[in-house]
Image: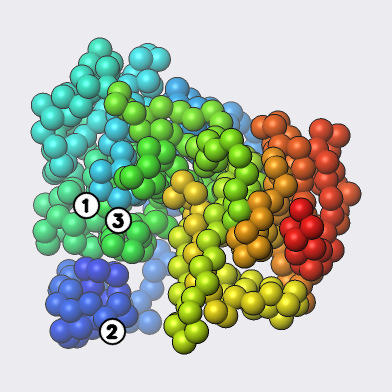
Amino acid sequence: MAKPKKRYICQACGSVSHRWQGQCADCAEWNTLVEDAPATVFSLKHDLSSGGRAVEFVDLDKPGEMPIRQKTGLAEFDRALGGGLVPGSAILMGGDPGIGKSTLLLQAAAKVARDGHSVAYVSGEEASGQVRMRAARLGLSDAPVKLAAATGVRDILTTLGQMETPKFLVIDSIQTMHSDTIEGAPGTVSQVRGCAFELIRYAKENGVALVLVGHVTKDGNIAGPRVLEHMVDVVMSFEGERSHQYRILRALKNRFGAVDEIGVFSMEGEGLEEVENPSMLFLSGREQPMAGSAVFPAMEGTRPVLIEIQALIVRLQSGATPRRAVVGWDSGRLAMLLAVLESRCGLSFSSAEVYLNVAGGYRLSDPAADLAVAAALVSALADKPLPDRSVWLGEVSLAGEVRPVAHGNVRMREAAKLGFERGYGPADPKNNTSKLRYEGLAQLANLVDRVMSN
């Protein structure tokens, strides 16, 4: 016979424990374990082979109409989604407070509604009047969006069942939703999981494109149970620095498209505006080349984006401890690159402070940026600017070799399109384009010779 068993769920990381304790064993947070609804443990002899309803199976090759994507009217948003909203899909969007998640979704909802589709926007954090004030500021007051301020999932689903089924439904945010069938306050693991399950089931059964806004923790992860990210079809992150006007919409998981696509927006006084040429956001407007500055053609999905990498070398007096400061790149990879430059190229950074910055607040994780970082470091050390209107790309090995990278020809074509004249990278003939003078570098020492002789 089944017997109830107590369990305790951490409200910070979602881990399960069968006894209460002051500190979570997984995330080390204090006083976060809360008793959940009793779990039922079934005997291994319990027979589940009968008593259920039959499940309908269909052939994989059965002909039928594929779901048609619904364009939102925001090309950058559609790009990140993989082409638009898929009916019956569940999208989870996270981002820092005040980054513009509600603004972006309100603009998308207004554009979809103006195209003649039914749209519902449910706010659990703001009153309807506050949302209308934002809509008036953004010039969206005339959009036929159905707006409600509610936190009860039962009330929301009951109301949606009595009206025309919306094509696009926004829930802002999932952490404010509450179900009267689940114990616990809004935002707890059990409430977030249960409310999300009910809303996603409604979206799947009625072909509604659902967007759930999620809060993030101090580490940048979406708050709540990890299973929430497995329940949805798309997980998106809205990123950016408050000190910069640009915003990047990135797909971290996408069952209907590529996960590396991004949408770039600029925060203006009248809301978010799409950026057709993201490279111009991350390149400085200086006219003369400066020492310690290199341009790297990064890849975001299928879109090449040109990024400026800046380096500064400060010589210290004997006995002082040098500092290494990195913004926008991996500090461990910088240490490795400095070791390669000292060991393979004979350069000395041991008595100098090294500062590295990726312009515009952009964050790089592409190993193809190794050569651009090395070029910026060597240029700053020698106090000599790199060749004017040049781009650098290539992965650097511990042996000092410059290795090939993916999509090198696409990166170079984008650089040539923006007016760059020279490209430096691995000795790969595919990277050479008719509009760009390309020079292959086999070893990192060739880069040092090129900078020193410039």
> Which residue is the site of mark 3?
216
Gap in angstroms between the C-alphas marked 1 and 3: 10 Å
Q: Is residue 264 visible?
A: yes
User: Quick one: 431 or 210, which is closer to the camera?
Assistant: 431
Q: Position of residue 4 (x, y in %)?
A: 19, 78
Residue type, mark 3 in image? Val
Q: Position of residue 25 (x, y in %)?
A: 28, 84
**Badge 1 element:** helix
Could you tell which of marks 3 and 2 lies nearer the N-terminus? 2
Could you tell which of marks 2 and 1 lies nearer the N-terminus? 2
Q: Is residue 196 visible?
A: no
User: Quick one: 442 or 139, which is closer to the camera?
Assistant: 442
- Taking the image as shown, residue 198 lies to the left or right of residue 377, namely left
Residue type, mark 2 in image? Ala
Vertical comparison of 180 with 417: above or below: below
Image quarter of residue 108:
top left
Gap in angstroms between the C-alphas marked 2 and 1: 24 Å
Vertical comparison of 411 with 229: above or below: above
Image quarter of residue 334:
bottom right
Q: State the mark number for residue 175.
A: 1
Q: Residue furthest front?
A: 317
Few, some or many residues within 10 Å of mark 2 (<14, 14–19, 20+): few
